Amino acid sequence: MKQPPLSGFSSVCVHAGHEQDPRYAHLTPIYASSTYVYDSAEQGMRRFAGEEDGYIYTRWDSPNFREAEEKIAALEAFGLTGADGKPLLVKAKLHASGMGALSTLFLAHLKSGDKVISHYSLYGGTEELFRKILPPLGIEAVIVDMRDLEKTTAAIKADPSIKMMYLETPANPTLRCVDLEALIAIAQEHRLVSAVDNTFASPYLQQPFAYGADYVFHSTTKFLNGHGTAIGGVLVGRDIEMMKGPVEKVHRLLGANSNPFDSFLLTQGIKTLEVRMERHCHNAMEVAGFLDGHPAVAQVNYLGLTDHPDFAIASRQMKHAGAMMSFELKGGLEAGKRFIDRLQMCLRAVSLGTCDTLICHPASMTHYSVPKELREKYDITDGLIRVSVGIESVTDILNDLDQALQ
């Protein structure tokens, strides 16, 4: 049965990518099979040659992978059109983790001697990949303040080895934003591949393809899954042939594939993305306002507050400020430790994007591997607290934060 056109974001969340199961199961069953059989030798040959669509081996593909991939691709391209005026087509590849998807992105495009330009205040794993894993392969990262467009352009002009621009906006954990439209235009002018980490925003709040990005990346573990039940990552690209060719080859040979069970859980989580994000965003505005006026709090980093330095950029390229924030307590590290220890409902945990409110201390947790001098340069201080605001009753969230701050 052909799927009808879908005009609503939530309809895409629920229905995109789904094919009727031949045995009429409501949901796509979990295909717990390592390999797939063929009707004939000729069919097997056609599938390996790419002349016939079908499944071969679960490291390569699975019905569970494909449903999640097509759903995410549909969300990232929702409502967008290509240069030909037709609905934008993009392709997604699901990975075992966000770091697996990042590895595929970099290794499919960069070789020894190449460089990637990015900005400070990145996710700790990405920053560590730039410092420890890529340099021995001859690939270097150039870090500049990309909110300064002139400085960014000058850095690119000064170094022809720069082949890729990698953006994370909003950034983790300072919630700094960069201007997607302006920076991707610079990347296009200088023939750089552009990639955007859209994990913090989700496709509900931000669509980097609208500004011409070549790739969009997610840790699907976070808002896309929404329930903290499965690790995953996805790389979405607008160059379909590149995705089917070099990107697919690196993905397969790195062994960074997801698994059917985690893919199944991801698919179910995505179905509630819009309704979850609406509640996340509502609660986060309430929490940010509460913290911003609290006598124990020195500073709140939330894009919905007009005094955030990137409020204007975020308002322009995001539907809402989102569910993530960080804040600094006046008592520094010791006050932060006391606050975290006193929490009763909100959870002491890393990760983000789950239904429950998660609170962590970046300097000793998500960014522990980043040298102290770099953390402080990036405004990740010892007293900074990161909050992923959940979908609980906002009154209960505020009551817990209030008693913990006493």
Image (cartoon, rainbow, N blue to C red):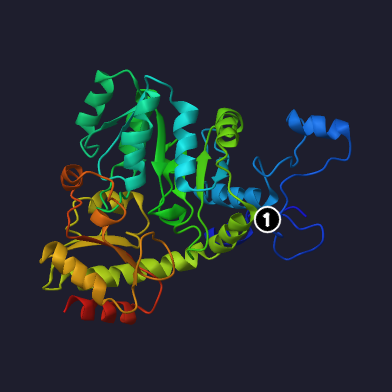
Residue type pointed to by label 1: His
Q: Where residue 168 sits: x, y (%)?
A: 34, 44
Image spot of residue 285 (x, y percent)? 29, 68
Nearer to the camera, 185 or 281: 281
Image quarter of the N terminus: bottom right
Along the line of sight, the residue nearer the viewer: 394 or 209: 394
Q: Residue 370 falls in which quadrant of the image?
A: top left
Q: Is residue 26 above or below residue 154?
A: below
Residue furthest right as drawn: 40
| Residue density around tag 1, few if under 14, some if 14–19, many if 20 or more, within 10 Å | some
Is 137 situated above or below 10?
Answer: above
Name the quarter where the C terminus is drawn. Answer: bottom left
Q: Secondary structure at mark 1?
A: loop
Residue 32 position in % (x across, y down):
71, 55
Residue 305 visible, this orientation: no
Residue drawn at x 88%, y 40% is 39
Residue 42 as seen in the image, left or right of residue 196? right
Q: Quadrant of residue 163?
A: top left
- The residue that mark 1 highlights is 18
Q: Residue at x 24, y 25 (%)?
A: 155
Report whether residue 391 is seen. Answer: yes
Compared to 69, does 85 lie above or below? above
Residue 101 percent location from the top left of the image = 49, 41
